[in-house]
Image: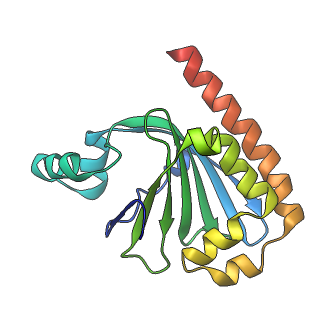
Amino acid sequence: MEIGHVCDLPPMRPDDARTTYFDAGVLKIGVEYRDLTPEALMEYYEADEGDIEELRRTAPLGIEDRGVSLHVFDAGGHWEYLRFDLFEDAPHYHYNHAGGGRNHIIPFDETAHGPIAEWAVDKIRTGGLAPMLAQAGAAELADGLDADALAGAADQIAALTAELKARLAAAV
């Protein structure tokens, strides 16, 4: 039995102007603060209000949230295979399968796994991305992971994530 929700729309690409990228060997990992709103979804997917209302009825995690997103791309930045949405109301992560057509969204259980930010950074730091990349159809990237590059990137990602979360807390 598969948990989560599968849709055929890819996740919204990061806004490069608001995203800081870190090189991590065969991967490039972006850190971005996001405000997910119905208006942003309408603009990105060129949808109308009816499409958004349908999405609102069927989206398991809702379509209004905010927080930091960690985007895991191949080193060239061509495909985002994984995303960790460290959102306030509904933290979750995505397996965005190679070639598109299957965006698998998994709700995150903070009771079982602790805060999603720490969990996600730990996946990066310890090589826990390997099975996740393989699940997303990127076994060749999983096989090429460099532990030192990931550990170095994880420290920088953790620091920027904490800074963005602190800014958010101060603004509320």
Say if 90 sits above or below 27 in the image.
Answer: above
Residue at x-position 69% and y-position 32%: 162
In the image: residue 170, left or right of residue 155: left
Residue 108, above or below 131 = above
Viewer-nearest residue: 92 or 146: 92
- Residue at the far left: name it: 50
Q: Residue furthest bottom?
A: 140
In the rendering, at what x and y percent does residue 157 appear?
A: 73, 45
Left or right: where 63 falls relative to 100: left
Query: Is any part of residue 76 visible from this angle?
Result: no
The answer to whether residue 157 is left or right of residue 136 is right
Q: Position of residue 41 (x, y in %)?
A: 29, 48
Residue 113: name its quadrant: top right
Residue at 48 percent across and 32 percent down: it is 88
Number of numbered discs overlaid on the protein picture: 0
Q: Is residue 77 visible?
A: yes
Q: Quadrant of residue 76?
A: bottom right
- Quarter of the image for residue 26 reads bottom right
Q: Residue at x 39, y 73 (%)?
A: 102
Residue drawn at 69 percent across, 29 percent down: 163
Task: Check the image and tell me how it is coloured.
Answer: rainbow
- Image x and y of residue 123, in percent: 71, 56
- How far from the left and from the top, in percent, is residue 128? 73, 63
Q: Which corner quadrant holds the N terminus?
A: bottom left
Query: Residue 86, relative to residue 106: is it above or below?
Result: above
Q: Nearest the camera: 35 or 145?
A: 145
Nearer to us in this view, 52 or 19: 52
Whether residue 30 sits left or right of residue 15 in the image: it is right
